[in-house]
Amino acid sequence: MQVTAVSRQWLARHGRVRDALPALVVLLVAVAASAVGRGDSGWHEPKLTGVAWTALACAPLAVRTRWPLPVVVITLAVDLAHMIRIPDFALAPAASLVALYTLATRAGRRTAWTVGVAAALVITGVYAITHSVSPLAGDTLLRFDLAIAATALGDAIRSRRLRLARAEARAERAERTREAEARRRVTEERVRIARELHDVVAHHMTLVNAQAAVAHHLLRTDPDRAHQALAHIKDNSRTALDELRATVGLLRQPDDAPDSRAPIPALTDLDSLIANLRAGGLPVQLERTGTPRHAAPTTELTAYRIVQEALTNTHKHASAQHVTVNLHYGTDTLRVTITDDGFPSTARGPGTGHGLIGMRERATAIGGTVTAGPRPQGGFQVRAELPLALIPHT
């Protein structure tokens, strides 16, 4: 098997040698056939004239894959002349059969069969005339059948090669599609984890920074309140670490060793979130309207992160005296509205815009929307429309 594979590779690199191999086989068979006597006469010297005609017909086969149609015309012309000059030489159309096979493997089906049928008819007619037999005689029809068989075999080989090529193309296309899908999923997961990290770090670090400033300011004048601020810093930093651990846990494989992971935040955790913000100096009021009820876990997480990011932005970039968070439970949607009466604070610098982008990406991922912008009467508002129950993808 290994020798055969090496031979095929060598022939694939040497096209002219591969094309000439059938001509060599036909020539050797012609030499042997011309040396066989009739009846009991046994072996004799090869008939060099017939062998020479065969060699002349086989010569174009060395370029049969490069110019298949001209090779058919030339070999057929030489074989027909051979049949006319030496009618009894049995291998007269052999080179033409190889050329017809090659044409059928290389050219289109219509061209191959048109040329093949025409060549079969011409070979049959010339044989019948040179041997003075009926075109329907057995030997005559044998030449016709051989030409048709050579064309049919070449057509079958060509069809098989096309099927294999299409199968390989489909396999390559499927492989590229799988790779692209894998890259897309990796990118989506990376963006999702980046949003989680941004929300956790930005929110808790903002609170820690604000509470540290309060503690620093009150450390000498009001130690009790400074102590409370430091306690809030401790609680917020511990919460931040728990959420970071849970977010990093998203990177683990299912069979990795489990660590301590905090539960995914939900709307029931908003009271604790707002209490921490109030302790940090941001006056926040939470309202629930409609008929409060549990939403899909992804909806609750998205709503929680949107509220968290909006309040963090207000705390970092605006000086607000009053902030309202409203959760309105509709029939099919949850409307989350965060409104403040503040104005941009230049002391802390402009934001990066990643927070608003993250809000929109989160909402879009579950089929919701987010709008955000300044209010005509002053302040800023973020509004999100989220589906209460997610429709599973089919």
Image (cartoon, grey):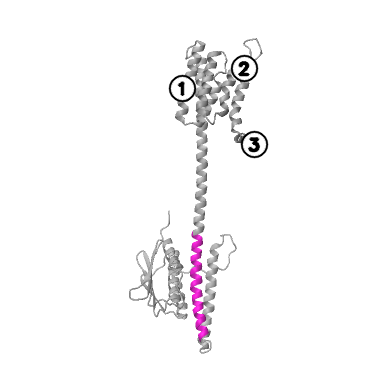
Identify the residue at the far left of this view: 376
Q: Mark 2 is on which residue type?
A: Ala
Q: Is residue 343 magenta?
A: no
Viewer-proximal residue among 266 and 386: 386
- The Cα atoms of the two marked residues, 3 and 2, are separated by 32 Å
Residue at point 64%, 36% (across, down): 6
Residue type marked 3: Val
Residue 101 on image: x %, y %: 53, 27
Q: Main secondary structure of the magenta part?
A: helix
Q: Is residue 336 visible?
A: no
Distance (Cα) linking label 2 and label 1: 27 Å
Say above or below: 365 vs 59: below
Among the two numbered marks 2 and 1 on one chain, the one whose residue lies closer to the N terminus: 2
Q: Which residue lies at the image location 53% right of the left edge and 16% below the top edge?
A: 81
- The magenta stretch is 188-217
Question: Is 215 contained in the magenta span?
Answer: yes
Please state which of residues 152 and 329 is positioned toward the viewer in this rendering. 152
In the image, residue 343 sits, relative to residue 137, either above or below, namely below
- The relative height of residue 101 versus residue 130 in the rendered view (above or below) is below
- Residue 33's disc is 2
Q: Which residue is mark 1?
A: 118
